[in-house]
Image (cartoon, coloured by chain):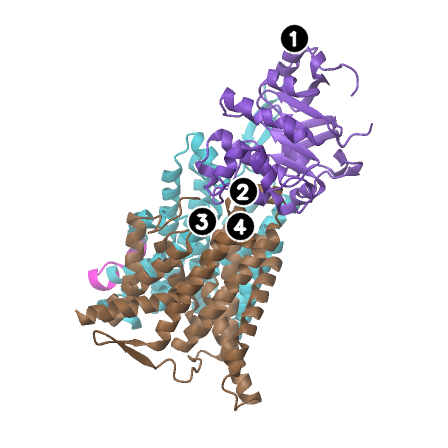
Amino acid sequence: MDMLLQTVLQGALLGGLYCLFALGLSLMYGVMRLTNTAQGDFILLGSFTAIAVIAGLKILAPENMWLPLLLSPLLLIVAFGFGYVLQRQVLNKVLGKDPLPSLVVTFGLSIVIQNLLLEVFSADPRSIESAGLNTASLQIPGGITLGVLPVLILFLAITTTFGLQWMFNHTALGRGFRAVSDDLEIAQLMGLNAKRLYAYATGIAFMLITMAGVLQGMRTTVSPSDGPMLLLFAFEAVIIGGMGSFWGTLAGALLLGMTQQIGFRFDPGWGIWFGHIVFLLLLLVRPQGLFPKTVG
Amino acid sequence: MHTLKVSRSNAASRPALIVALLLVTVAASIPIWAPEEVRSAWMREFVEIACYLVFALMWNLLAGYGGMVSIGQQAYFGFGGYVMLMLSNFLGVNPFLSVLLAALCTAAMSIPVSFVAFRLQGGYFAVGTWVIAEVFRLSFANLAFVGGGSGTSLTAFAGISKATREQTTFWLALACMVFSIALVYIFLRSKRGLALMAIRDNEVAAESQGIAVQKTKLAVYVVASLGAGLAGGLYYLSNLRITPDAAFSVNWTAFAIFMVVIGGIGRIEGPIVGALIFWILNKFFSDYGSWYLIGLGSLAIVITIYFKQGLWGYAQQQWGWSLFPTQRRLKESTKGKS
Amino acid sequence: MTALLQTHALTAFYGDAQALFGIDFEVHQGEMVAIIGANGAGKSTFMKALTGLVSTQRQQISWKGQAIGGLAPSDIVKRGIALVPEGRRLFPSLNVEENLLMGASAGRKGEWNLQRVFELFPILKEKRLQPSTSLSGGQQQMVAIGRALMSNPAVLLCDELSLGLAPIVIKEIYAAMPLICAQGMTAVIVEQDVSKAKEVSSRLYCFQEGQVSLHGTSSSLTQEQISKAYFGMPDAHAAVGGDA
């Protein structure tokens, strides 16, 4: 019984990370119906950028251990800018009723990023040093041990989801996002600049992506070819949870994490497979997801 | 008074048909006239390009004509390969026959899979098919009797000479290529094909005209998977060694996308032109490894944004070329009542 | 008196299909002009062309003397032309108040704000936080009008206000029009109900198959003239009642 509880809890913690993978995907699809097939690769781009920056800082200022942490807001700002420019210069050109152009472009970006990372960093797995944070653990009643970093990640996932949902419901920007998502033509009739709104959305999505990438790099090792796997986890979390709701995405991510952990318990080789199968079964019986918003 | 008649051929298509027949005859006779030193290599390369082409042709049918963009067709490619191998190795079926049977099995497999896949639309359909392909990969990677993660080899050719094997594989590949092109062309010229293009242009309007949208989409999906399975079976017939990571790799779809986008989506000539260009690029640049792939990806992005119709589509727009005309044109007939 | 909004031989296409075949139209400051016509006559297409939802050539539409044909919708609303779209088209994910606030996105200054809209349509204040889709047809129409007013337009275009509404509700909606126009608002209304159109407008245009088949002062047009123009009778094309 203890074993089951431990497995489920660890699955929930894993789900926290999956939620961060998925929020950016959910945001971009929700606002502009764009499926970012390069999501996983961009997450890794975030991880490796952080790795490179930290390595560089180590050379420039070896004694200062806290510098990377202090610079992380800067990384998020750069990420926002990157997403904004990418949307305005590239992705805005391929949006439309036909899903193919955006799929081909994001898929092309996926291949370009994967191979660029491969060239620059080689295929060796790397990780971000977290001064022992990734091995620290805490005991909770019931004799269960949880990692400190995973708990932190879950906490971040919950607060980020809350923040995103709040932004959508209570700010002018969020209102704009909902309007262009509902009816682009009429939103433009009201005077909204869709191109700029889309760029803001992608900018925010890339902040989430970078956060996810850094945390993934701290929690485990990353290698340039991990991209597709991360995309599929993010995608499954969004679908399981139900489209149109960030809390749904969080729920979907938690469920996916738990399913995978249970699968791993049975046999390490079948863990991910089990997650995929549960996803496909859910798609069969409840394609709208667990918590869909009724609005199309 | 002139009457109007529906015409499908145009000025370029009839001489092109003759040229095509000539090319096929020349190609078929390669085992006879090709010099000894390069014969084997040429045949192997031809088989490889035939597999790429058939796969791309089918992906184009599904996405360009059927409007269903899939990033998971590699599921059927690998499935076809594995089934071909299992039929040959374990049931003693003639490997050449296995390829054809494997294609049929793949088509059958696609029907239950479609129940799940069709739950999604657009971009999410694309990623969903990728998940399904991963399930195929992981499943086969965990089956010990086909070698698990390390894969296995085709042993059914023991006792047959290399020359015979290579020649028959070559002719089978040529036949599959011609068959696939003919199949797609005839399908698109038929009423079903017109229905498909109507669905692609406007699904709701098509439905209101009485077109069975779901049935037509399923038919296309099954045909596309048949083709993918055929390509997979053929590829591993030639390659002799299969591994799950290679057989179910998303790179197959990536290359198909590249060929179709470069050549021009939604046109039959597109994948053919794209496959040729891809083969040429491959010949010169594949040694550059990652940089080659970066180049391919960037090229696909640029063409999608700035040359939406691909290279053949651009030619069609500028000069009205069409080797495989599927458009129906109203022509004034000079015969008729006056 | 120069016209506020004018079209010159306006043409519009949906792909290859032509919908408007040369519309000459004008409206002056403070006027209420009605457009009538059968379904498919081109009335809604005309509204879309005026607001940039359907593209036209630059010189075919002029606003205060400037050519604005084919500009983006967001540019046109900034200049002061607002549309109450056919079928309301409220934002389903937004509540009543948020829908109204969206109307102010163009950033034009003027007398219309949330408070004034609530004064005009008190029921909306009551339902301000409810999802827009939960309101009745008439109430949704009020939101759509309010949303257009929030952009402080100089010209209000209303496309089929009475569509799908009960007569008593239509009466209520139109009762608000004088209040809206009291401060000199100019309005163009597309209306299915011919007698209503005659009643509320000073001038009237009749569209038929993408062309103007009749125009003149509403009070002087006879029922017979209008019927002929509406249905496309041979001698229907005429300008009656002098030039406005």
Q: Mark 3 or mark 2: which is in front?
A: 2
Look at the image and tell me whether residue A270 can be seen. Answer: no
Tell me which amino acid carries mark 2: Asn
Residue A95 spot, x, y in % from top left: 55, 51
Q: Which residue is mark 3?
A: B122
Q: Where A205 falls versus C160 (above or below)?
A: below
Residue A21, numbered label: none
Q: Specify the subunit that label 2 lies on.
A: C
Residue shown at 25% from the left, 62% from the top: B86
Mark 3 nearby-residue class (10 Å; few <14, some 14–19, many ≥20)? many
| Quadrant assignment, res B235 | bottom left
Label 2 Cα crowd, 10 Å radius (few <14 / some 14-19 / many 20+):
many
Q: CA distance from mark 2 to mark 4?
A: 9 Å
> Which residue is identified by label 4?
A175
Can the viewer see residue C163 in this picture? yes
Specify the quadrant that holds the C terminus of chain A: top left
Q: Which chain comes out cyan in the rendered image?
A: B
**Residue beneath label 2, please?**
C99
Distance from disc 4 to disc 3, alpha carbons, whole Å, reads 25 Å
Q: Amino acid at mark 1?
A: Glu
Query: Which hue is chain C drawn in?
Result: purple
Q: Are marks 2 and 4 on the same chain?
A: no
4 or 3: mark nearer the eye: 4
Identify the image quadrant of residue C79: top right
Give A270 or A68, whichever is nearer the viewer: A68
